[in-house]
């Protein structure tokens, strides 16, 4: 019996010592040692980690044919089959780099991204709203970025020699019609949508993805917030009006509703205005946003549905003095009613599938009284889209999308009971392939096709971009593509079968983010073909046709530094644009008034902890706007003096949930001139009388108090400023 | 007869030996060994070894949340190391985030996992506080709040909230009473816990020194 037990115990111990020793070295493809890699036999607890020199040695209890698995963060894991018999084994393993979307190269040509998550961003969402001089207007903040020109008597986005209609704006991938408030000529407008709706934006000054179309110059894609953090109420009391927003969140869904009212009359009665207002602008708006999330990102299937509705109304009446004629001039009264609704979804499924899409409707109604004429204009854009993206591997993905647009426009002269209108159906398909050769090299190719029922035209536009990352974290990227756009509705109504205008972009970009410093340099060339031309005045054009052409070329630079000066963040922008085009009523190629040659801006933000305040200043400058003087031979012969605006703002946080914000534009009181307006008829001496087009007031002063009510006393409305 | 008694005794003896070692399954044995190592680890290579070891255990026990939990912890501790570059920290914390989601899917509404998710988020904030502070401080506090709502007596959720609140109070120049309240509560809970019992169950015990450090910096 004793012998039996001894044998039994001996056997148990003996089993434990049939071990195989495996040793080796783990390296990357360049032969550099990989420390901290995990090496183990699949299906067992036997394993170890490589040391600082990439070496490892491990005793394996298992025997027979086994699989050795090697893993390291940032590398593709590798399996090696081996037969374990007790003899020591040596294996050297080379791991290949995994594509890591976090640090991999990105296409930065033409693109300026604002977001919290990605690295290659130029701005954080918050920067947009804390930029001094922006006054809560998204586009005003974007005008401090390279490639843009400030046109003070318009207020919209002008990109690289393109006019404002050449920029298309999207919310959650769906187009927004009439994204800027309705206004009369030379009275600047602003974006209708509050910056606090958005978690990020993608602003492209050219060469953008095949996903976007009907924009010759630029695309601005705004992405709304997912789930808000908490239940809260936001009160705002401003020098121009006030508003209230209530947010309710529960588990996977949320609702936000807000209402605001603005009236400039009290302010304008205190501060001298250059414009002859009969009725100061006033407006109200209200919005509701619903969000529902499902699934769990950890298990693969997850999604989001968002619905957003915005309605607003505004009114104003102004007298616009005419050059060379006594009296108050033309009387323009404008009542606007605007509705926008958007439902969008996003769902990520198994096997690398992602689906997104939705539908949006913009409806803009302007009732204009121009002296004795009553005009009604209705512009409607319906956009729907469905996109499927498939990641075939971490290196290769493909995007496929279908779009349908219904656009209609109607203009009625109420007194004469005359209406003219058009309706167009547009169908688009786009396909885009992205391929990562490595973490350093990426290539994107896309093709967008379209058909317009009204223009009776089918078109195909290719897009291409490539980016390469250098050793020093800097990267070069190049983008090229063709872009098409149908004429603006106010011109298209005169010639409804107008086909597309076209632009070709070439962009070369260098981009580097390092240690809280960002530098970006970009050179571009843009060629225009088939631009809209006409004879006569823009309000009554004759012979509307596509006989124009032109180009824009230039370079721009952007430097941002959060490091050098403590608690201070600043950026400097310089853009050079050389643009000439034959368009509108011009008979030759001219430098457009909206494309000043030299443009610059400096934005500084400084946090003063002792004062609990964010102090900001921004300076915007350009070399002057061209204008046409009918007293001189030729076209666009003259240029205004340089434009310059220095703004200042301060946000004081006495308590974390209370913000007092004061801002002033054009602190120095400079008299900026945006151009000259001339009489249509010469006077007795044969000269045309002129009058400068200037600012509404010398300065604009804004003060607001923003209070957030929530259980979490630290929440604030910094996003709303 | 005597032989038979001897045999029974021998078999009983053998059985005791076998059951004694069977009390801890290979999973439990491996876990306990690695948890002890993780708590004592003091360098990046050791933390990475620990992450690798928990990764191996997780692969063999795909339905257990604890191996993933400790793996996240090993990556997050690395992500907090000041000697690493921002890219490296982000890479490690992205891994931690991914694994934390996996743990959350395995054990839903688990206050420990939610507190850990908050910890990962806090490490991301710390990696680049100047540019991430404003956007991430809300989500960090909210995640800790969620963990406290699930288990008001979770000492780690309390200690981490204390640390976050303390930093925010300093930034805004406001009082630290709220932060200190959480710190003291956490210290008291840590003191009343049976650490050995938790260790036997392989449940988290870390965070005591953080709570004590926070409480010491309070008036």
Image: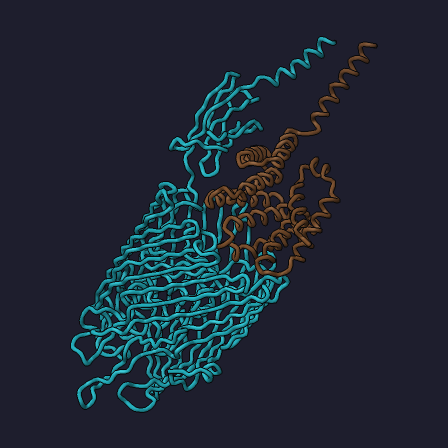
Chain colours: A cyan, B brown
- Comparing B66 with B105, the one in front is B66
Answer yes or no: is residue A357 visible: no
Q: In the image, residue A395 lies at what x, y percent?
A: 39, 42
Answer yes or no: is residue A114 visible: yes
- Comparing A655 with A37, the one in front is A655
Q: In the image, residue A217 lies at what x, y percent?
A: 31, 62
Number of residue marks: 0
Residue located 73% across and 19% down the image? B14
Apparent side of residue A439 relative to residue B195 in the rendered image (left or right): left
Instruction: Name the outermost residue toward the left.
Output: A633
The image quarter in which residue B38 lies: top right
Residue located 35% across and 61% down the image? A573
A438 in relation to A152, above or below: above
Residue located 37% across and 82% down the image? A274
Q: In the image, residue A315 lies at what x, y percent?
A: 44, 81
Instruction: Name the outermost residue toward the right.
Output: B1
The image quarter in which residue A624 lies: bottom left
Apparent side of residue A630 relative to residue B127 in the rendered image (left or right): left
The image quarter in which residue A524 lies: bottom left
């Amino acid at each position: 019996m004793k012998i039996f037990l001894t044998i039994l115990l001996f056997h148990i111990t003996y089993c434990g010592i049939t071990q195989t020793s495996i040793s080796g070295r783990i390296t990357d493809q360049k032969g550099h040692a990989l420390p901290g890699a995990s090496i183990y036999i699949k299906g067992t607890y036997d394993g170890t980690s490589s040391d600082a020199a990439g070496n490892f040695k491990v005793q394996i209890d298992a025997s027979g044919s086994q699989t050795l698995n090697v893993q390291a963060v940032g590398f593709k894991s590798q399996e090696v089959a081996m037969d374990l018999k007790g003899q020591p084994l040596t294996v050297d393993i080379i791991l290949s780099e995994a594509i890591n979307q976090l640090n991999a190269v990105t296409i930065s040509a033409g693109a300026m991204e604002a977001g919290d998550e990605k690295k290659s961003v130029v701005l954080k969402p918050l920067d947009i709203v804390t930029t001094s001089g922006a006054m809560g207007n998204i586009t005003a903040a974007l005008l401090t970025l390279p490639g843009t020109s400030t046109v003070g008597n318009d207020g919209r986005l002008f990109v690289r020699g393109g006019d404002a209609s050449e920029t298309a704006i999207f919310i959650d991938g769906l187009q927004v019609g009439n994204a800027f408030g309705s206004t009369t000529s030379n009275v600047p407008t602003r974006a209708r949508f509050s910056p606090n709706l958005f978690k990020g934006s993608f602003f492209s000054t050219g060469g953008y993805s095949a996903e976007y179309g009907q924009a010759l110059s630029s695309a601005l894609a705004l992405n709304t917030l997912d789930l808000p953090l908490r239940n809260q109420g936001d009160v705002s009391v401003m020098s121009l009006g006030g508003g209230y927003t209530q947010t309710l969140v529960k588990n996977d869904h949320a609702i936000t509703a807000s209402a605001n009212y603005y009236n400039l009359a009290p302010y304008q009665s205190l501060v001298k205005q250059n414009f002859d207002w009969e009725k100061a602008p006033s407006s109200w708006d209200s919005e509701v946003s619903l969000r529902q999330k499902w699934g769990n990102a950890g298990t693969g299937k997850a999604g989001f549905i968002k619905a957003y509705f915005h309605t607003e109304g505004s009114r104003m009446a102004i007298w616009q003095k005419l050059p060379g004629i006594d009296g108050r001039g033309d009387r323009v009264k404008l009542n606007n009613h605007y509705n926008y609704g958007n439902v969008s979804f996003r769902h990520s499924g198994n096997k690398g599938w992602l689906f997104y899409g939705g539908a949006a409707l913009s409806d803009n109604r302007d009732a204009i009284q121009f002296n004795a004429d009553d005009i009604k204009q209705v512009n409607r854009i319906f956009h729907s889209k469905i996109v499927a993206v498939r990641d075939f591997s971490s290196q290769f993905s493909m995007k496929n999308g279908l779009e349908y647009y219904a656009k209609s426009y109607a203009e009625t002269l109420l007194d004469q009971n005359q209406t003219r209108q058009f309706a167009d159906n547009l169908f688009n398909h786009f396909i885009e392939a992205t391929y990562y050769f490595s973490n350093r090299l990426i290539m994107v190719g896309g093709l967008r096709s379209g058909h317009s029922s009204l223009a009776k035209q089918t078109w195909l536009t290719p897009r291409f971009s490539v980016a390469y990352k250098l050793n020093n974290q800097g990267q070069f990227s190049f983008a090229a593509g063709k872009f098409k756009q149908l004429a603006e509705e106010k011109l298209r109504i005169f010639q409804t079968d107008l086909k597309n205008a076209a632009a070709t972009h070439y962009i070369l970009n260098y981009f580097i983010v390092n240690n809280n410093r960002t530098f970006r340099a970009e050179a571009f060339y843009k060629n225009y073909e088939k631009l809209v031309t006409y004879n006569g005045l823009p309000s009554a054009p004759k012979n509307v046709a596509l006989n124009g052409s032109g180009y824009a070329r230039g370079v721009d630079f952007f430097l941002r530094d959060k490091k050098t000066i403590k608690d201070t963040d600043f950026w400097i922008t310089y853009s050079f644009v050389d643009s000439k085009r034959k368009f509108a009523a011009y008979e030759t190629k001219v430098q457009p008034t909206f494309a000043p040659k030299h443009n610059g801006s400096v934005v500084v933000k400084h946090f003063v902890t002792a004062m609990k305040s964010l102090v900001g200043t921004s300076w915007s400058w350009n070399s002057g706007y061209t204008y046409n003087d009918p007293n001189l031979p030729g076209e666009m012969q003259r240029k205004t003096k340089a434009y310059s605006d220095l703004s200042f703002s301060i946000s004081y946080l006495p308590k974390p949930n209370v913000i007092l914000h004061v801002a002033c534009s054009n602190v120095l009181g400079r008299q900026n001139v945006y151009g000259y307006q001339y009489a249509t008829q010469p006077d007795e001496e044969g000269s045309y009388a002129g009058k400068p087009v200037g600012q509404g007031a010398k300065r604009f002063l804004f003060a607001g108090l923003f209070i957030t009510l929530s259980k979490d006393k630290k929440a604030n409305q910094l996003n709303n400023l | 007869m005597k032989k038979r008694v001897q045999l029974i005794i021998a078999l009983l003896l053998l059985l005791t030996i076998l059951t004694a070692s069977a009390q801890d399954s290979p999973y439990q044995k491996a876990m306990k060994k690695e948890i002890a190592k993780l708590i004592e680890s003091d360098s990046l290579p050791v933390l990475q070894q620990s992450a690798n070891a928990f990764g191996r255990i997780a692969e063999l026990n795909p339905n257990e949340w604890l191996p993933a939990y400790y793996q996240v912890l090993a990556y997050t501790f690395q992500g907090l190391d000041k000697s690493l570059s921002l890219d490296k920290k982000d890479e490690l914390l992205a891994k931690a985030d991914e694994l934390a989601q996996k743990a959350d899917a395995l054990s839903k509404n688990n206050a420990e996992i939610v507190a850990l998710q908050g910890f990962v988020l806090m490490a991301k904030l710390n990696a680049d506080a100047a540019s991430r502070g404003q956007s991430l401080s809300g989500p960090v506090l909210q995640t800790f709040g969620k963990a406290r709502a699930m288990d008001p007596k979770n000492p780690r959720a309390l200690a981490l909230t204390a640390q976050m609140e303390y930093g925010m109070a300093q930034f805004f120049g406001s009082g630290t009473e709220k932060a200190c309240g959480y710190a003291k509560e956490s210290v008291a809970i840590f003191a009343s816990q049976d650490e050995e019992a938790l260790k036997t169950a392989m449940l988290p015990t870390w965070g005591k020194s953080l709570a004590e450090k926070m409480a010491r910096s309070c008036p």
